[in-house]
Amino acid sequence: MVHVQPARTSSGARAMNLLDRYIAVAVLKGVATVILVLLAVVTSVEFVGQLDDVGTARYELKDALAYVVLRIPRLIFKMLPAAALLGALLSLGNLAVHRELVVMRVSGVSLVRFVGSVGIAGVVLMAIMALLGESLAPSLGAYARQLRSQALLESVDISNARSAWMKDGDRIFNFRRAEDGINFGSIFLFELDANGSLNQVARADSAQIDAQERWILANYGVTQFGEELITASTERRSVQNYNLSLELLGLSEVREDLLDTQGLTRYIRYLKQNSLDADRYVTAYWARIADTVAVLLMTVLALPFVFGALRSAAAGARLLVGLLIGLGYYVIAEAFVNSGEVFDLNPVVVAWLPIGVLLVITSVALLRIR
């Protein structure tokens, strides 16, 4: 008698581990299928959009294809929360249609156990999303941007990745990257007069481009060459408007989606140290973490639907519900981010409030399952 109970416990544990694996794998397969379908649609649209630039400068069809392929990790990162819900709905819905979930419930599998099994898949998806957001998406996205800029280039010399020359009318610019590889380093400006003679030389220790594409120059010094005398002036901070092609140069304002979490942290610190507005990047920092958590919640949110009204619904109906919820979450999250910038709301609240709402909805929906 003493040895019988442990044997049953061990057998039950193995059965539960097998059940966890079965449900988690089913969910992951469903999510993978959804991602492949969404990628096929989105990449096709992106590729068609790139065809407008094919033939410009050295931008060829192969460059457009490479650009789209390099952006795939970023696209997966953005679509994972919605894909997690869609994939879980389809896979769990398929189990419900074939009465497998009913058999599991009758066999004594509790709702908490289902949440744990689906949660395993959610944790795996969170890990994948973290890997994409911290490694593949920023690095490959930045490379895709650089590749496109170089191929579209005609008037800019960027053979040296840490320095670039650009001519705009009578002005010649030399841009250099800072040591952190994120901000501009020193910038030199050479301005010519109508006769092609040097009219003035300007230099800034560093520069930043704001959301309005204005150049914020630090320690901006100008040397003016007159006919009889030379004058020099210095400003600690100068705001300039240059008519430069930021798209061709590939050096527009720092984009949060091309930075990993460490890069965002460094850049936020840089902005705060220089008394510049960092709310946009603080919001992006917390939103990235919140979106990763959303993947887990979206996966678990599928359970109330497959145990409720959509238990016997067709795959198309489940897909429609998932699309509506996924799009709704995305629209609400983006609306909060935009309203945060307009109304100067707390970036942490802006980033986490949609997740809080999603958590409440998921919890209430789970509690209503009978």
Image (cartoon, rainbow, N blue to C red):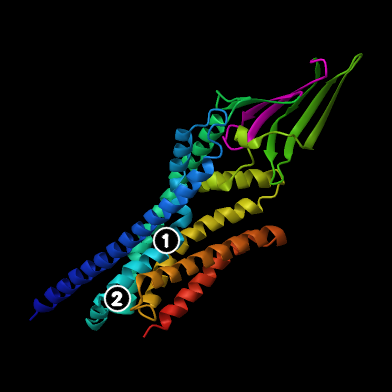
Left or right for 120, reference 322: left
Residue 237, placed above or below residue 308: above
Return the mark for residue 96: 2
Q: At 33% across and 78% down in the image, what residue appears?
A: 312
> In the rendered structure, which segment of residues is drawn in magenta?
170-196
Q: At 69% across and 46% down in the image, what residue appears?
A: 211
The residue carrying pointer 1 sits among few (fewer than 14), some (14 to 19) or many (20 or more) residues within 10 Å by Cα, namely many
SS at mark 1?
A: helix
Q: Is residue 133 visible?
A: no
Residue 136 image position (x, y, % from top left): 43, 44
- Amino acid tagged 2: Ala
Looking at this rendering, what residue extends furthest in the right direction? Answer: 228
In primary-sequence order, the first of circles 2 and 1 is 1
- Amino acid tagged 1: Ala
Residue 230, placed above or below residue 49: above
Residue 21, placed above or below residue 261: below
Q: At 83% across and 19% down in the image, what residue appears?
A: 194
Taking depth in this image into account, of 176 and 246 the one nearest to the observer is 246
SS at mark 2?
A: helix
Residue 55 image position (x, y, % from top left): 54, 31
Determine which quarter of the picture holds residue 7.
bottom left
Residue occupied by mark 1: 83
Determine which quarter of the picture holds residue 217.
top right
Quadrant location, the N terminus: bottom left
Determine which quarter of the picture holds residue 229.
top right
Taking depth in this image into account, of 85 and 1 the one nearest to the observer is 85
Magenta stretch contains residue 117: no
Left or right for 294, reference 21: right
